[in-house]
Structure formats: structure tokens, C-alpha cells
Image (tube, grey):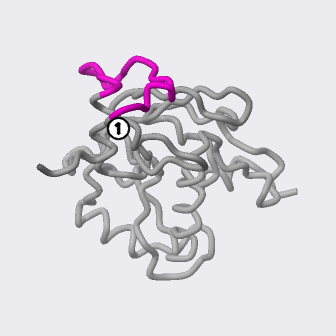
Amino acid sequence: MKKKSKNTLFIELAKPNAKGVSKWVNISEFIGEYSRLSHANGRDWGRNDDSRFPFKIDQQKEGNKIVEYRCGGIKYSLNRSIRSDLIKKIKQQKCLLLGTSKPEVDHKNGRKNDLRIGKLINQKLSDFQPLSKAANDAKRQHCKTCAKTNKRFDGKKLGFEKSFTYGNIEYLESPEGCVGCFWFDVRDFQKKVKVI
């Protein structure tokens, strides 16, 4: 018999409902067949960047130690395809950050959790922006950090007088959660916020 994955074990233990929300599971419950879920420095199951784990994970801490986990809702994964007519238009532009030609087509929403954009017919030119490979790689890294910490990128780090054009450092879980971050719309941010 094939051994169950740790992701499967946690889902069994947590028992998420139809919306992907579960009870809180204390680490003291990681016993018997669930003892494989125990960890020291960082868990190797239920990670937000693991496409095989369909739920967001919430955690409770005592000091620096995580003592409880729960499934905090379904992770929505967006079809990342982009309509060819939009790709063609964006590739004719220059990178908004570096001014170089032949940009990549960047989804403005770094979390890619807007289901409307997942349907090709609903996509608009304004959902995307031209970024060079270097700029897009930098954005991707900052978006990964935001996904792990729920702290948005601070525009002041690039010398702007304001951190955000909308909202604050806390990422609010929604398709609009990226709005106001420098990386969400580089052109809009540069228009609205002065460099110091």
C-alpha cells in the first residue's frame, strides 16, 4: 500500500469544509500516523507555493513557535494563459521600469487569484503590463515574499515618498489585494508617487 503524502495526512486530520476552512489542529495532535507532520524549523507540507496542496494555511504561534494550524480556505489557481492579441500589443511596448524593448507580459496581480482573468474572454489589456525579464523576475521574487508573509512591497525601498497608492503593508486576501503596490501597476505608481 502506498504511503500517504503529508499533505493528505494534514487534510485528513484537519477536515476542511466545502469552503476549505478547517478546525484548528494543535501540534500535539501530530501523533500516530500523523507524527510525520511534526517539524522543527519549517514544515515541508501544506506550503502556499505547493500546487498539490489546495488550501491556504493559517497558523497560531506562542512566541516564535507555531502551535496550531488550520486550512484557511481554498487556494484559487488561475489559468495563466494570456490572449494572443494582448500579448502582441504588450510586446510592442517598452519595459515600464527599465525602458528596454522586447518585454515579457506580466500579470499585474502577482497572486494570480482573480478568476475573471483566468478566462481568456474576460481579459483586458489593463490586466497586464510590459516588464523586462529582469524586472519581471524581481517582481516575482517580491510577490513570493508577499505570499509568504502577507506583507506587500514597500515603494519607499525604491526611493518613492509613499509606500503604496492604496492600502497599507498588510496584504488583504482578495483579487484586489495587490492594488496600490508598486509592482501591481508600475506606470500608475510612477504617475502618482514622487521619487524623493
Residue 135: image quadrant is bottom right
Q: Residue at x 40, y 28 (%)?
A: 71
Q: Counting other residues with Cα less than 10 Å from the Cα at mark 1, is it few (<14), some (14-19), or many (20 or more)?
A: some
Quick one: quadrant of the C terminus? bottom right
Q: Nearer the viewer, residue 127 or 81?
A: 81
Q: What element carries label 1?
A: loop
Q: In the displayed structure, would residue 104 be above or below residue 33?
A: below
Residue 142 within the magenta-colored segment of the rendering:
no
Count of numbered marks: 1
Q: Residue at x 38, y 41 (%)?
A: 113
Q: Which of 74 and 61 is in front in this view?
A: 61
Q: Which residue lies furthest to the left in this view?
A: 1
Q: Residue at x 56, y 76 (%)?
A: 134
Q: Which of 18 and 115 is in front in this view?
A: 18
Segment colored magenta: 13-32
Q: In the displayed structure, would residue 89 be above or below residue 102?
A: above
x then y, percent, for residue 183? 59, 55
x then y, percent, for residue 25? 45, 23
Which residue is tagged 1? 75
Q: In the displayed structure, would residue 85 be above or below residue 196?
A: below
Q: Residue furthest right?
A: 196
x then y, percent, for residue 45? 41, 46
Q: Which residue lies furthest to the front in this view?
A: 32
Q: Residue at x 23, y 45 (%)?
A: 4
Tell me which amino acid carries mark 1.
Lys
Q: Is residue 166 left or right of residue 9?
A: right
Residue 27 within the magenta-colored segment of the rendering:
yes
Residue 8: image quadrant is top left
x then y, percent, for residue 53? 32, 44
Determine the main secondary structure of the stretch shown in magenta. Answer: loop
Q: In this view, does 158 lie to the left or right of 51?
A: right
Q: Which residue lies furthest to the bottom in this view?
A: 101
